[in-house]
Structures are given as C-alpha cells and as structure tokens.
Image (tube, rainbow, N blue to C red):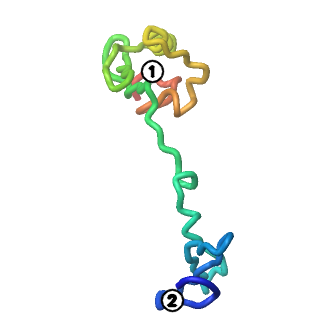
Amino acid sequence: MIGGGGRSAAGARARPGPAGTVRPPYRVSRLSGFRFTLDDMTEVASPHISRPRIIVLGVQPGTPPFRIVEIDGQVVGEAKALTDVLEAAAAYGITIHDADDPDVVRWVGGDKYTWSLH
C-alpha cells in the first residue's frame, strides 16, 4: 500500500519516506511494544564472524606435547610453546600483537597457556 497509514492484510503499515517515497513496512508487536523495521535486518546489524588466519589446534601427545599450527588453512608445523606460534606467524609475514584476539588467532582445545595434556 502506498501513501498514508492504512494496513495490509498481514498487519504491516506502510511508512511515508522522504519526497513521496514509501519506506518498508513495520510491525508493531502487541506483546513488547517495540517497533521492528525491515531496515533493522541489514548486514551492518548482523554479527561479524571471521576466520582468523592462524589456528592452533589442541595439545597432541608427544615428548614434549605439542600443538599443530595452521596458517591460511595449511598445516605449517608444530608448536611446543607460544613463541613457536609467534615464529611461525612471522615466517608467513603475520605479526601477532595480541595472541588473545580471536580475529587473529583461534585457540582450539585450550588457550595460549595450554601446552600439556589434561
């Protein structure tokens, strides 16, 4: 429906926009009183899910125990300490400023302090 405040069969209201345009309809929830607009469901409002370039897998049995390091989806080696992860990243041109940043490093099966089997 174009124009003023009528309702369609689905209960949505058309909203007049600037210069005679019509904005998308909105629904009013009778339970909560909040107004939900179709404009609220944009990419900007969606959660950001990233895949970090570095993934450190869980501790593997060995003498000493180690963790497998992947960079850009490829296994690049074993790490026996955090310094090994930093060195592997540097070899691929990646500088890690914060090893706790999930956009940079994903720690699977423990954090940067987990280097032994439980």
Image coords of residue 109 (percent x, y):
41, 33
SS at mark 1 in the image: loop
Q: Relative to 18, does residue 27 appear above or below in the rendering?
A: below
The crowding category of the residue bearing disc 2, from other C-alpha atoms within 10 Å (few below 14, some 14 to 19, many at least 20), is few
Q: Residue at x 51, y 27 (%)?
A: 104
Residue bearing the label numbered 2: 8
Image coords of residue 112 (percent x, y):
52, 24
Q: Residue at x 55, y 73 (%)?
A: 24
The crowding category of the residue bearing disc 1, from other C-alpha atoms within 10 Å (few below 14, some 14 to 19, many at least 20), is many
Labelled disc at residue 115: 1
Q: Nearer the viewer, residue 68 or 71?
A: 71
Q: Quadrant of the C terminus?
A: top left
Q: Residue at x 44, y 24 (%)?
A: 54
Quarter residue 14 falls in: bottom right
Q: Nearer the viewer, residue 27 or 71?
A: 27
Instruction: Report, in whole angstroms, how far the alpha carbon at label 1 lies from the one at label 2.
Output: 61 Å
Which numbered disc flags the more N-terminal residue, 1 or 2? 2
Q: Residue at x 37, y 17 (%)?
A: 66
In screen coordinates, is 105 left or right of 22? left
Which kind of residue does numbered mark 1 sit on? Trp
Dot 1 and dot 2 residues touching (CB under 8 Å): no
Q: Nearer the viewer, residue 10 or 80?
A: 10
In screen coordinates, is 108 left or right of 13? left
Image coords of residue 100 (percent x, y):
57, 29
Q: Outermost residue, front direction?
A: 19
Q: Relative to 74, does residue 92 appear above or below in the rendering?
A: above
